[in-house]
Amino acid sequence: MNFPILSSLILLPTIGALFIFFTRSNKKENITVKYVALFTSFVNFFLSVYLWILFDQSTSEFQFVENRIWIKDFINYKVGIDGISILFILLTTFITPLCIISVNNSIKNRLSEFLIAVLIMESFMIGVFCSLDLVIFYLFFEAGLIPMFLIIGIWGGVRRVYSAFKFFLYTLLGSVLMLVAIISIYWISGTTDVVELYDIGIDVKYQNLLWLAFFSSFAVKTPMWPVHTWLPDAHVEAPTAGSVLLAAILLKMAGYGFIRFSLGLFPAASEIFTPLIYLLSVIAIIFTSLIALMQEDMKKLIAYSSVAHMGFVTLGIFTLQQQGIEGSIIQMISHGLVAAALFLCVGVVYDRMHSRLIDTYGGIVSIIPKYSVLFMLFTLAALGLPGTSGFVGEFLILMAAFKDNFLVAVIASLGVIIGAAYMLWLYKRVVFGKLINTDLKQMIDLNKSELFILSCLAIPTLVFGFYPDPLINTIEVSISDLIEMYNYKLASRL
Amino acid sequence: MENLQLVFPEIFLSLSIMFLLILGVFKNNSAKLIQNISLVTLLITAVITFNETISISEAKLFNNSVVIDYLSSFMKIITLLAAFLVLIISSNYLKTFKIFKIEYPILILSSVLGMMIMISSNDLIVFYMGLELQSLALYVLATFNRDQIKSSEAGLKYFVLSALSSGLLLYGCSLIYGFTGSTNFNIISTQLNSYEYALTFGIVFILVGLAFKISAVPFHMWAPDVYEGSPTSVTLFFTMVPKIAALSVFIRFLYVPFLNLIDQWQMILIFLSIASMLFGAIAAIGQTNLKRLVAYSSIGHVGYALAGLATGSNEGIQSSVIYITIYILMNLGLFSCLLMMKRNNEYHENIEDLSGLSKNHPMLSLSLLIILFSLAGIPPLAGFFAKFYIFKSVLEQSMYFLAIVGLLSTVVAAFYYLRLIKIMYFDKEKEKYDTDHSLWLKFSLTASTILILIYFIFPSQLIEVVSRINIIQ
């Protein structure tokens, strides 16, 4: 393969953004601008699907590797994918066009700037998932802050400034420690190339501190309790498309980072800190679920449920079993689809009624039936009903957790029940019940584009719920090799 | 016979200054002419420096009191180019305040000459001579808008405090001379005896003097007032050019005569660096005047540059040089924006004046956005790489505390940069600013923005140039 397919994936959205940047001056061109953005993101999506077709599932070697000298004798621009990263790339390229379609209703001013920000964001996110050099990874990981800060700050709600600052500073604070760790790794091991580092390993005596430094960054981004507080604020204030990007993809960077770097590079430290992760995950699951139960703002409720779901993800990753990690990845993909859909659902009613409060609604099932059906589907997927993708992930994670630590698994399972409680209660209060607020009668059901977006998200949710094999086949070999390497390194004290 | 070719740039520059002074006396209304000749002079000097000295790895002149090496050539060329750009973008500003006079370019040329001597100095006396030449010119530049009280105040304050620090510096020089018997850097290094405490005192006094010139905490007090009071174009000059010279003197002074005493001065530098980074970041938060804010931010940036020097390694020196180069680029862009905020012949320099800039002037605010994110050190912009190299060299020496404090202060500093971005992008718009900027102003803004933006595509070039600087043999 000579065609640099990964670099094209990274670059294409940026080129689209540049194109929009140079044609935006005229106000009437808003439509054109949107088509350009859509076109770019769709091309990117098909390119990534093509990548999935070409992808060889039978090996855990990195594929489509590109390696160029970037800073001489120091850093190489190295990208490549394995079974773990390809699904995240697909998720990114799948969600972005849907975001772009959804701006129809929600973004009123500065559309072209918004699309530029979204496209550049897409570039960075794909870059995060396929970089095979720590410095390159850091570069993409941090660079994403800029467009997201602007998305929240410019197009957000009333308290957007506070939220944007909180988001930016929290994440930056977590990440700078990771930068120290990355540079230290360079001086300890002489390289920042992930593949080489997998081979040579990192001296055990440094691992604990390095692990903690990476953890500080990923914990903020995941977000794990107690550093999750930026997420509800950011979600509530961000425009719908921003929330979708945030929930569906940005949060996954941390889960991906845990698998790729924390497990892969610091096995000894991961083993030591597993109880910490368990503790924080369980707290996240129970505690934030309880908080979610009490929310009056729909977006906030879903944001807290995201924290709980990510708690399952971290729990699954650190069970260090095949099912656990597989479950975590599927849970992340599923959460990417479902949380995106739920935020879009909130966005739909918000565009019509300009309220996100649960009280405002009630009894809308007869007014907007199509919406109610799809909303129900995603509610059920969020609580992990069998037959939806949410079930597969949670089930695998809990199964692995039961093998590893009974108590943790029991508590986490309780979280599933609370999860069902808040999601169903939310659905009941919004959709069913008496129609008290008469303004709701004016509501129009889903228009074509909304229906399209939500169906696009509903189909994979259902398909992967019944038939998760395509996902599992893709990640299986990579994960089993990762675990094998992990155990080998642990045994030989590398 | 000395090889005078090597000091050709300095000779040419001094002759041009004398010629321009005479021309200014004999020809009326020659401000524009002298400005143009000065620009050409700066460019020619840069070219001569490039041609004559860039290939010299090390040469010493005049009883070893002047040294020409990669460091001096590189720093001189940056100084000259920066001075050129300052001069060329400040003319509109000066005309607005009716201070477009012949003295301005001549003073800038004189201070540049002083800096070139400083950069090349290998002897305490030569160094002091260069320092005073540049300082005297700078005092006058600070008061250049003499009808304004603030400008006069700035100049006076700068003069008094700077004289004090020069005194300390001279006292340090005399101590060193007393205990080593020479003012020459190379001879000092052979005469060192670390048991002489007075020698340490000498180093400390000189470091204090230098820290003052580079405005490192705790010797920074003059900077915010002087930066605020001076005409903006002079502030631009202050934030960029003297820092290059002071930094190269710092490098040479610490690493040529006193490398063996690194245990004595390393802690001082670490303290200066940490104090500057933290103080610069925290104190800038409360500022409402953009020039004051830039002053504090430049204090912070000096802290990062000093962190590289504290490492005691060639990599550290190189990273500091890279840092100062990228910092100058960013500052140039930042001040070009400041110089564009003009409405009805009045320059606006409060942070509220940025309000809603993105609606009225999308391109200007986009450039400022990129520059500010770069100053905050967010990848993939140039400012990130500057910090990255610094921390790389700091961590090579296992100075974890310095690295972590430095990186945490970038988070604090990010706050006030973000606040500016917030004002530009999230707040309500105000009246529009004038758009009839000079071509050069637009050029310097566009060029610096684009360089900052695309630096990540070719990061090796600058490193390759800088990696030829090897002070520690």
Image (cartoon, rainbow, N blue to C red):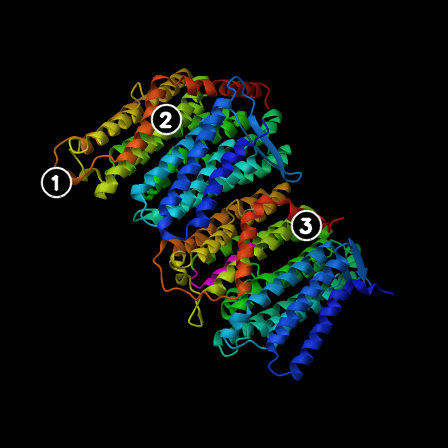
Chain of the residue displaying label 1:
A
Circle 3 crowding by C-alpha within 10 Å: few under 14, some 14–19, many from 20: many
**Which mark is first along the chain, 2 or 1?**
2
Q: Which residues are magenta?
A: B287-301
Question: Residue B113: x, y in percent?
Answer: 69, 68
Secondary structure at badge 3 equals helix
Question: Residue A76: x, y in percent?
Answer: 61, 36
Mark 2 or 3: in front is 2
How far apart, in angstroms, are the residues tagged by discs 1 and 2? 36 Å
Specify the label residue B466 is tagged with. 3
Q: Quadrant of the N terminus of chain B?
A: bottom right
Specify the label residue A334 is tagged with. 2
Q: Amino acid at mark 1?
A: Thr
- Residue beneath the point at 68% across and 46% down: B464
Chain of the residue displaying label 3:
B
Q: Amino acid at mark 3?
A: Val
Question: Residue A225: x, y in percent?
Answer: 38, 34
Residue identifier under label 1: A438
How far apart, in angstroms, are the residues tagged by discs 2 and 3? 49 Å
Q: Amino acid at mark 2?
A: Ser
Q: Is residue A51 magenta?
A: no
Question: Residue B154: x, y in percent?
Answer: 53, 72
Chain of the residue displaying label 2:
A
Residue A110 appears in the rendering: no
Mark 1 or 3: in front is 1
Q: Main secondary structure of the magenta part?
A: helix
Residue A286 appears in the rendering: yes
Secondary structure at badge 2 equals helix
